[in-house]
Image (tube, grey):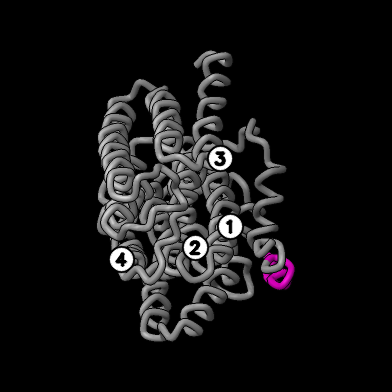
């Protein structure tokens, strides 16, 4: 792809998300989401591979459907309340429809089935953009409407943590595992959104750091399946020693940074007298922990199922920048002691 075209697409991607961030009108928010979708479609199909084109087509149909439902709900809200302001959406019917439309765009269960198939057809770089940057605009709209006392959000959150953990158990393709991981992590964010929006902000920041470190590691190792992880030790031994800690941080184990949002979310749910919900969420996190441990085991304790002569790939120099990966890996592993500072920062 031409550098000029790539620059234009990345600019459009940032512009669409920024428009949604800054808009207080449903039409402007919808336009921002559409610009965002159209920009990433070209990035998804840039390889001209049938799987990439199929993934881009599926993504377009899903996002177009979600945007149409969102526009319908905004129009319904304007008809019922007489205003287009996002933060003044007070009628329960359009709020419920908007929540479901944004859940479809985010990939929350039970509206998540498009995500694993779309991720499987993409490169790791485009998958990283889809797992992190593309979640920001819909999540911002959810934070702006803030459905109070909404059982729908609790249902979406618990279902996402359950299916996000359950769906990844029997997968062998890393991109599908990361898609289910994204669904499970979004479930945690949605669970606490109506009670403590600052914790949702903290959770998405920690998830972006951990997911970026994971995707960059897999890209450096050129691994797309669990079997290919077994030869990554020959390519980058130091990175393979560090990667299990990043994966366990993504799972939410102490003393890594990923434990911070889960700990605070469970604490907030208990304060809101939702102890059964907190217990269920903590139990579903064990499902996700299983496939993170599976990846860790495959990367550090197994060898590729091949003869000895075929296990050692050539250690060619990588052209990928490793400084961002090093910084993100350190941040993903070691920032748990800064929990009070992080809380003060997101509460501003």
Neighbor class of circle 3 (other Cα within 10 Å; few <14, some 14-19, many 20+) is: few
What residue sits 35% from the left and 70% below the top?
A: 154
On the image, numbered disc 3 is attached to which residue?
22
The image's mark for residue 348 is none
What residue sits 48% from the left and 56% below the top?
A: 143
Q: Is residue 173 shown to the viewer in this render?
A: no
Q: Nearer the viewer, mark 2 or mark 4?
A: 4
- Place of residue 178 in the rendered image (x, y in percent of width and height, measured from the top left): 42, 52
- Place of residue 51 in the rendered image (x, y in percent of width and height, measured from the top left): 29, 31
Q: Nearer the viewer, mark 3 or mark 1?
A: 3
The residue stretch that appears in magenta: 334-342
On the image, numbered disc 4 is attached to which residue?
152
Horizontal relation, residue 19 to residue 151: left or right: right
Q: Is disc 2 in contact with disc 1, using a CB cutoff of under 8 Å?
A: yes
Q: Quadrant of residue 316?
A: top right
How far apart are labels 2 and 4 at the CA level? 35 Å
């Amino acid at each position: 792809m031409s550098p000029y075209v790539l620059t234009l697409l990345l600019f459009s991607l940032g512009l669409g998300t920024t428009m949604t961030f800054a808009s207080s009108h449903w039409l402007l928010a919808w336009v921002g989401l559409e610009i965002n979708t159209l920009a990433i479609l070209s990035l998804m199909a840039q390889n001209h591979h049938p799987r990439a084109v199929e993934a881009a087509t599926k993504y377009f149909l899903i996002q177009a459907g979600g945007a149409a439902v969102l526009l319908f709900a905004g129009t319904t809200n304007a008809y019922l309340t007489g205003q287009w302001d996002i933060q003044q959406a007070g009628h329960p019917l359009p709020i419920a429809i908007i929540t479901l439309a944004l859940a479809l765009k985010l990939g929350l269960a039970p509206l998540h089935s498009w995500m694993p198939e779309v991720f499987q057809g993409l490169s790791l770089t485009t998958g990283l953009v889809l797992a992190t940057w593309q979640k920001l605009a819909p999540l911002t709209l959810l934070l702006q409407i803030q459905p109070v006392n909404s059982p729908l959000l609790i249902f979406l959150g618990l279902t996402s943590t359950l299916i996000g953990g359950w769906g990844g158990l029997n997968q062998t393709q890393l991109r599908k595992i990361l898609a289910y991981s994204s669904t499970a992590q979004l479930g945690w964010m949605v669970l606490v959104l109506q009670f403590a929006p600052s914790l949702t902000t903290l959770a998405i920041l920690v998830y972006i750091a951990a997911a970026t470190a994971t995707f960059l590691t897999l890209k450096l190792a050129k691994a797309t399946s669990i079997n290919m992880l077994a030869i990554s030790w020959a390519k980058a031994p130091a990175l393979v020693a560090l990667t299990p800690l990043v994966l366990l941080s993504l799972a939410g184990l102490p003393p890594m940074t990923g434990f911070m949002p889960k700990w605070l979310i469970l604490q907030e749910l208990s304060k809101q007298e939702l102890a059964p919900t907190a217990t269920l969420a903590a139990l579903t996190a064990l499902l996700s922990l299983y496939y993170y441990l599976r990846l860790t085991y495959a990367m550090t304790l197994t060898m590729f199922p091949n003869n000895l002569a075929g296990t050692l790939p050539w250690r060619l120099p990588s052209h990928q920048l490793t400084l961002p990966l090093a910084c993100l890996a350190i941040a993903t592993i070691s920032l748990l002691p800064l929990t009070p500072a992080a809380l003060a920062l997101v509460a501003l």
